[in-house]
Image: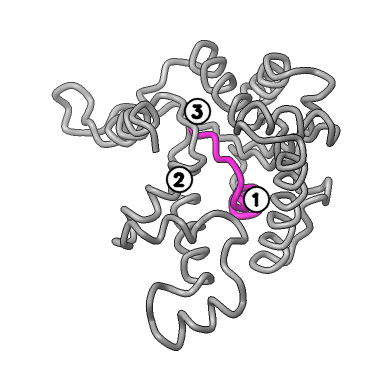
Amino acid sequence: MTNTSLEHCLSFINSHTQPAGGTGGFAPAGARRAVTISRQAGCGALVVADKLARFLQEHSPRHPAPWTVFDRNLMDKVLEEHNLPVYLAKFLPEDRISELEDMMVEIFAVHPPARKVVQQTAETILKLADLGNVILIGRAGNVITARLPHVLHIRLVAPLEERVKHAREAYNMTGAQARKFCVNEDLGRERYLKKYFKASISDPLLYQLTVNTGLVGYDEAARIIGHAALNLD
């Protein structure tokens, strides 16, 4: 997690634990809103999410908590909440643990099995979404929070060539590496949702809105999602 991301997360958490001036209670939260983003690899989800957070911060009613993006930093939050060792971070990205590795884990108790970590991640996602003013990227956030009426579920897509170009530039990859990255990440995310949540990532009914960043661009995507979130009934 970068220092900036850490500062944003701490600011978000502190805003929910600071009592309102002299009353002994907590600051009023107002109308809760949260956004989940499911994405194809390389479609600029983190860029869009950062722009969306700024848009919502500027246009939302006054709220004690800053709009905060949880992507990779979500895993740090999971480790912290469940007292898990830091070295587990490398096992936590979507679809990184094979069936064989999971079996060895259960036999030798080296670290919690994948299903346990997924469960703990889901618990953290629910807590964050319930607080509001969060943008949750990936990890089946849309499925986990499906019954929360104040959460908007977004799917970001883009043509493969556009995604390969973005991945090449964002991660300093060759064209071949970027293409392989996009294909493998998409397959991994599909497996993750199917294995642990019995859902299809491409099911349009899981989302209120699908946005093609290859057509509208990142700024416009953030604006479209922002207006949808602010007008969520």
Seen at 61% across and 40% down, the residue is: 36
Seen at 21% across and 30% down, the residue is: 19
Q: Secondary structure at mark 3?
A: loop
Comparing labels 1 and 2, the label whose residue is closer to the camera: 2
Q: Are marks 1 and 3 in contact (CB under 8 Å)?
A: no
Residue type at mark 3? Ala
The residue where tag 3 is placed is 31
Residue type at mark 2? Leu
Q: Which mark is residue 42?
A: none
Per the model, the C-alpha gap separating discs 1 and 2 is 19 Å
Please determine whether, in this image, residue 121 is positioned above or below residue 173: below
Residue 180 at x, y percent in the picture: 75, 47
The residue where tag 1 is placed is 146
Q: Quadrant of residue 27?
A: top left
Seen at 39% across and 38% down, the residue is: 1
Dot 2, how many residues are within 10 Å of its Cα: few (below 14), some (14-19), or many (20+)? many
- Residue span colored magenta: 134-147
Comparing labels 2 and 3, the label whose residue is closer to the camera: 2
Residue 105 at x, y percent in the picture: 46, 79
Residue type at mark 1? Ala
Residue situated in front as seen by the camera: 33 or 8? 8
Residue 195 at x, y percent in the picture: 69, 68
Per the model, the C-alpha gap separating discs 1 and 3 is 18 Å
Dot 1, how many residues are within 10 Å of its Cα: few (below 14), some (14-19), or many (20+)? some
